[in-house]
Every structure is written in C-alpha cells, then in structure tokens.
Image (cartoon, helix red, strand yellow):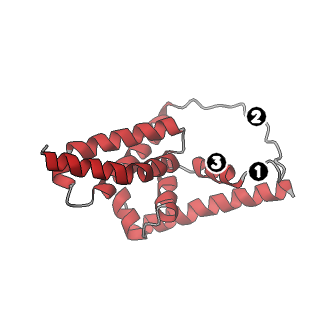
Amino acid sequence: MTDEDEAAFDEFLAARSTALLRTAILVCGASQHDAEDLVQHALEKVYRHWPRIRHDNPGAYARRVVVNAAISAARRAKVIREISFARPPDTAATAADLDLREVMLGELRRLPARMRAVVVLRYWEDLSETETATLIGCSVGTVKSQAARGLGRIRERMTRLEGVSA
C-alpha cells in the first residue's frame, strides 16, 4: 500500500471506527468484546482491500462485513447452543427497575440475527430499505417484513412488560 493509501485509511479509521463499533454492538447483540472483535475483523478486511475500495464506499463495505459476520456468528452459535429445558421463573419488574435503554437493548438482543440487523440498520443507522437490502444481500420486501416483524415483537414484549409493571 502506498503512503497516500495509508494516510487515507488512517483518516477513515479515525472518522468511522466509533460508528462502526456502535453498529456492531447493536447488530451482534452480545458483549462489547464480541462487537470489538467484529469491528477488528471488518477493519482487517477493509485494510486488505483498501486500494480497491478506497474510492467507492469503504464505510458501507465495513458495515456490511460487520453485519455478515454477526449473522454468521449467530448461525454458528445457534447450531452449537445447548437446548435448556429448565428456565428461571419470570420475575415482574417494577417501573423503578426498568431502565428503558437496557430494556430496549435486551429486546433487540432477543431478535434473530438477521431481523436484528434489519432493525438496527433501518432505525439506528437510518438507512433506506434499499440500502439495507443491498447491505444484507436480500430483497426490499424481506427488509420490510423483517423490520415490521422485529418492531412488532419489540412492541409486543414492551406492552407485556408495561402491563406487568402497572
């Protein structure tokens, strides 16, 4: 890589790494450590392909790598995960216990990986349906249905929580 490419990559890194980490945290639905690993993986790929993607849209490329890696990791985890038959009892939360941000992040984590990615990209990253479909590699109709179902699940769960705390 040329010195000019290195300098441009450093500028990209400074400008986009925080937003990329935020997206990774929301999309992967796991710990910040896992999200940091996803971002590191994405930045390695961006760096390897920098001369080719530099003048296109490296931010979109990096975001797509993060989303695809999160979806793949969720698929692997689902296959590996043991089925647990014993569940701890559901406990009623009081209004004082509910921190809306934590509740929303928890509900986001409950969504399947692809649905979570659609919701995050559409409503957190404020991408259009077409941009989201292109990034994930699916149709616009899939984005619409996944977004509607994801928001519906979150609303349903939040309504039930609201009823329990009332």
Residue type highlighted by circle 1: Leu
Q: Secondary structure at mark 2?
A: loop
In front: label 1 or label 2: 1
Query: Which residue is depicted at the point 43% across and 46% down?
Result: 71
Say whether disc 3 or disc 1 marks the residue closer to the N-terminus.
1
**Quadrant in the rendering for residue 127:** bottom left
What residue is pinned by disc 1?
98
Alpha-carbon distance for marks 1 and 2? 19 Å
Q: Residue furthest left?
A: 2
Could one spot residue 63 in this view of the protein? no
Quadrant in the picture for the N terminus: top left
Alpha-carbon distance for marks 2 and 3? 17 Å
Say whether disc 1 or disc 2 marks the residue closer to the N-terminus.
2
Query: Residue 159: x and y, percent?
Result: 75, 61
Query: Residue 125: x and y, percent?
Result: 46, 61
Query: Which residue is depicted at the point 57% across and 59% down?
Result: 150
Query: Which mark identifies residue 88?
Result: 2
Query: Which residue is depicted at the point 73% across and 51% down?
Result: 99
Query: Which mark identifies residue 106?
Result: 3
Query: Which residue is depicted at the point 38% across and 69% down?
Result: 130
In front: label 2 or label 3: 3
Query: Residue 139: x and y, percent?
Result: 38, 65
